[in-house]
Image (cartoon, rainbow, N blue to C red):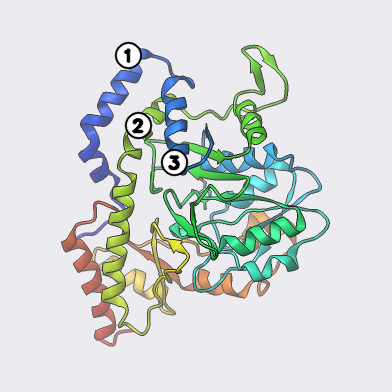
Amino acid sequence: MKVKFLDLSRQHSGLRKNLERSFSNSIRRSHFILGKDVSLFEREFADFCSAKYAVGVNSGTDALFLSLLSLGIGQGDEVIVPVFTFIATAMAVSHTGARPVFVDINPSNYNIDANKIEGAITPKTKAIIPVHLFGQAADMQPILDIAAKHNLNVIEDACQAHGSKYKFPAGGEKFAGNMGDAGCFSFYPTKNLGACGDGGLVTTNNENVYKKLLMLRDCGRKLRYEHSIIGYNSRLDAIQAAILRKKLKQLNKWNQKRRSIAAIYTKALQGVPELILPAQENYAYHVYNSYTIRANSRNELCEKLGKNGIGTSIYYDIALHLQEAYKNLGYKKGDFLNAEKASRQVFSLPLHPYLLDKEIKFVIKSLTNLFKRGGL
Ligand SMILES: *Cc1c(COP(=O)(O)O)cnc(C)c1O
């Protein structure tokens, strides 16, 4: 049997009629830039997260970049970023002219270690970007407390966490993307909510940030040809917005399915001593953008699973401080031991809402057999 790591065509074959209808409606209306589908999607996604405002942009990277700009962050500033994430989190900071300052992760949930944030704060620090990695919210209460104490902005990277939630220690819960000054989402096709192309969005409850974002994404426009700031062209495509409106209706169901597959994996694999399974924190409603596990023999396991027809993926095998692109920041090997260890050990199993029961069983059987045979 072959089990692909991800099979987006299954998602689209189920929705095809529906998506084709949106697509042909868009063509018929021929209103391709901003317009009704973009503003309706913004309203619907803001409501989904219980946020006041949402602004569609052209990618998750730009959601981060424009959020930073909307808060006035730039040259001479520092922004705290977890060292174990997709490079876009840091890249967005660099493009504003500010400097990303890395902080190590909590080794059990892969999110920024809140206990290490204060050690990285300097007089130049302006913001913290917690990432809700793999679909699980970072521990937000301590992060928000530190930010309040030091007067820092919080920009959430929720690019892997559409529909994820955080439970506050004092009670109550909030959606990922609705806890800081801005929440950044990507609609890259592999995300929990993915477009048929690129797309992104920022949620916020701050009217000033909202108004600034509307201008930044659309050439600094105040009126049609009146430009009050030097902006960008970073609009969410109207056809993508129409498609995302259809897919948003499925998101809760898809996330529940992801969670139930994760529960099956966890139940079946918890007896394998060589594997460390994802920690499901009590404060988090985890939406499993990926089911990421770790093992010392990671490379060998991935290779053998591959030979059995099972696709795996590694998020991420190089921590950001060791990326060539960030050589100039002056970090070295050994600076962030938890992230470095994770980057040697993590790998992700196939998990998407259209994975079949027999495929889940096959993945479990193949993986557990590798250990039973004593081959590793
Ligand atoms: C996908 C992703 C991004 C960037 O999103 P794009 O839409 O690809 O620009 C940023 N941060 C994280 C954590 C991501 O997973």
**On the image, numbered disc 1 is attached to which residue?**
28
Q: Which mark is residue 73?
A: none
- Residue 245 horizontal/vertical position (percent): 36, 33
Which mark is first along the chain, 3 or 2? 3
Q: Secondary structure at mark 3?
A: loop
Which corner quadrant holds the C terminus?
A: bottom left
| Amino acid identity at mark 1 | Arg
- The CB of the residue at mark 3 lies under 8 Å from ligand 1: yes
Q: Which mark is residue 187?
A: 3
Q: Are marks 1 and 3 in contact (CB under 8 Å)?
A: no
- Residue 264 horizontal/vertical position (percent): 26, 68
The answer to whether residue 138 is above or below residue 246 is: below
Tell me the distance, in whole angstroms, between the alpha carbons under discs 1 and 3. Answer: 24 Å
At horizontal 31% and vertical 57% (from top left) the residue drawn is: 258
At horizontal 29% and vertical 83% (from top left) the residue drawn is: 371
Tell me the distance, in whole angstroms, between the alpha carbons under discs 2 and 3. Answer: 11 Å
- Residue 167 horizontal/vertical position (percent): 49, 61
Q: Say left or right for 366 vs 273.
A: left
- Residue 94 horizontal/vertical position (percent): 69, 47
Which mark is first along the chain, 3 or 1? 1
Tell me the distance, in whole angstroms, between the alpha carbons under discs 2 and 1. Answer: 15 Å
Q: Say left or right for 118 vs 3.
A: right
**On the image, numbered disc 2 is attached to which residue?**
243
The answer to whether residue 269 is above or below residue 233 is: below
Q: Say left or right for 182 vs 78.
A: left
Which corner quadrant holds the N terminus?
A: bottom left
Dividing the picture into quadrants, the one containing residue 37 is top left
The answer to whether residue 352 is above or below residue 243 is: below
